Image (cartoon, rainbow, N blue to C red):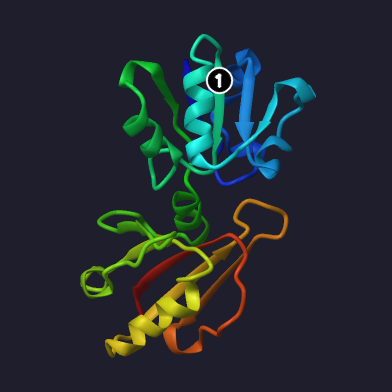
Amino acid sequence: MINIVGIGPGAAKLMVAEVATVVARADVVVGSQRQLALFELPVAKRYVLPKLSELKVFLQNNQQREIAVLASGDPLLYGIGNWALHQFPREQVHIVPGISAIQYCFHQIGLPMNDSYLTSSHGRVPDFDFLLHHQTVAMVTDTQIGPYQIAQEVLRRGQQRLIYIGEMLSYPEEKITCLPADQVVEREYALNVVVITNA
């Protein structure tokens, strides 16, 4: 069985109870070094996440074993769960949901998620004309299209928007900033989520 395990934004206290059960019974736990470090695992049980093409081969070759693939946030919100469901029969994949970084960010800033549009700029170019018709947009970002680039897209359309930037969410270094779009500076932003709302 392939278990895709949502581990939430990072803090152990935010993981659902099923995570510990699935990880404990797994023969192999797959994840990044950062994800694997959250669990006390014997070395023989750890498998550092390779490229997806290599992961697919590994999973195909180990179908008789219980595998847990760790997924940051929620596996089905722009996560590896989407990939797994497209690569393997549904009956071979078990998804353990997790609290997404987007959910966590909304709760930290005290903003309802109702009617928000959720998306990602990770490895893709969003349609900002479409997105910025929505009152509230939440986005998982990457180093190519991050908070500064998003703010510039807002300004190009002459909109007055507030931008919340959540960095290292749920970690001790957590930082959440709220700025008008014209005050978002160009710099490196660590593991971040952006929420765009009306000023």
Rendered location of residue 61, percent (x, y): 51, 18
Number of numbered discs visible in the structure rendering: 1
Q: Is residue 198 above or below residue 110?
A: below
Q: Is residue 42 above or below residue 110?
A: above
Rendered location of residue 57, percent (x, y): 49, 28
Q: Residue at x 47, y 21 (%)?
A: 60
Q: Nearer the viewer, residue 188 or 44?
A: 44
Q: Is residue 181 above or below residue 28?
A: below
- Residue 21 visible in the shown view: yes
- Residue 17 visible in the shown view: no
Task: Give the image quarter of residue 157.
Answer: bottom left
Question: Mark 1: which secondary structure?
Answer: strand
Rendered location of residue 111, percent (x, y): 41, 60
Q: Which residue is mark 1?
A: 67
173 sits left or right of 108 in the view:
right
21 sits left or right of 103 in the view:
right
Q: Nearer the viewer, residue 162 or 69?
A: 69
